[in-house]
Image (cartoon, rainbow, N blue to C red):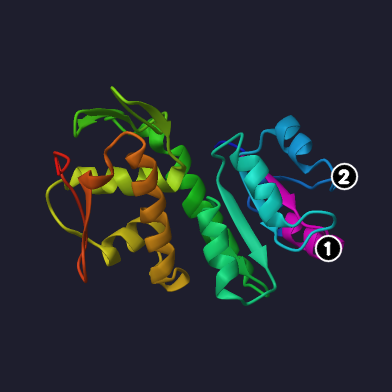
Amino acid sequence: MRMFTILLIEDDETLFSEIKTRLSQWSYDVYGVKDFDRVLQEYTDLKPDLVIIDIQLPKFDGFHWCRMIRSHSNVPIIFLSSRDHPTDMVMSMQLGADDFVQKPFYFDVLIAKIQAILRRVYNYNNEQIQLKTWCGAAVDFEKNTVSNEHGTIELSKNEMFILKRLIEQKNKIVSREQLIKSLWEDERFISDNTLTVNVNRLRKRLDELRLGSCIETKVGQGYIAREEADPR
């Protein structure tokens, strides 16, 4: 079995040690940050499979470092926060985070989320169909890219996962409930607004290739991946 590497960006030494100990019991290789002024450099040096970031950190907050990491990589990211503001979750998803865990939390929940994300992200290479044509564009599920005559965009893991599920049932309505269950595996931990944020980000990226209209919202029902973009 592959040993996954996790970078835990947490300045509370007691909590860091507790999380590291528990994750190590599940055979995860956990590293912390030595210098909170050089988080991006330490991330680049380690090249982890997953990042867990606390929002409240010395110097710069977790949102800042998420932006920095996202400018270089689509590595899966989980936010931790002791704050209960809904805007924190929305901000996390808008920045490209894969999940959000509020403190205090049950370790079983955190581990389940980590396992689900790693399974979702790193099982792409095991799928038989890696390349598909949709709306005149080449969709590469392994490289997380969409290309047409207008260029190439690279999607986040969540964006590509949503697009893939919609394309698999193109021209059919995929309900919001189906997407939530498929994407996060347990809808109890995810708000309806989180899905909206992710779909809006996906559509905005596809607009760069003039494909945004290929994803249609059916109010009160879900979403449809059309085979052809609306010419209007």
Mark number displayed over residue 222:
none
Residue at coordinates 34% horizontally, 62% vertically from top-left? 181
Q: Position of residue 174 (x, y in %)?
A: 21, 58
Write down the residue under mark 2.
35
Which residue is more in the foreground, 40 or 78?
40
Which residue is more in the foreground, 118 or 47?
47
Write down the residue under mark 1.
12
Q: Position of residue 132 (x, y in %)?
A: 24, 29
Look at the numbered disc 1 and give the secondary structure of its residue.
loop
The reply to whether residue 23 is in sight is no
* Rendered view: 230 above or below 89: above
User: Crowding at label 2, few (<14), some or many (≥20) Cα neighbours within 10 Å?
Assistant: few
Residue at coordinates 35% horizontally, 33% vertically from top-left? 141
Q: Tag 1: residue type? A: Asp
Q: Which residues are magenta?
A: 4-21
User: In the picture, residue 43 is in which quadrant?
Assistant: top right
Which residue is more in the foreground, 141 or 146?
146
Look at the numbered disc 2 and give the secondary structure of its residue.
loop
N-terminal label among 1 and 2: 1
Residue at coordinates 41% horizontally, 66% vertically from top-left? 186
* Rendered view: 102 above or below 195: below
The reply to whether residue 92 is in sight is yes
In the shown orientation, is residue 173 left or right of residue 22? left
User: In the picture, residue 56 is in which quadrant?
Assistant: bottom right
User: Crowding at label 1, few (<14), some or many (≥20) Cα neighbours within 10 Å?
Assistant: few
> Is residue 14 covered in magenta?
yes
In the shown orientation, is residue 66 left or right of residue 197? right
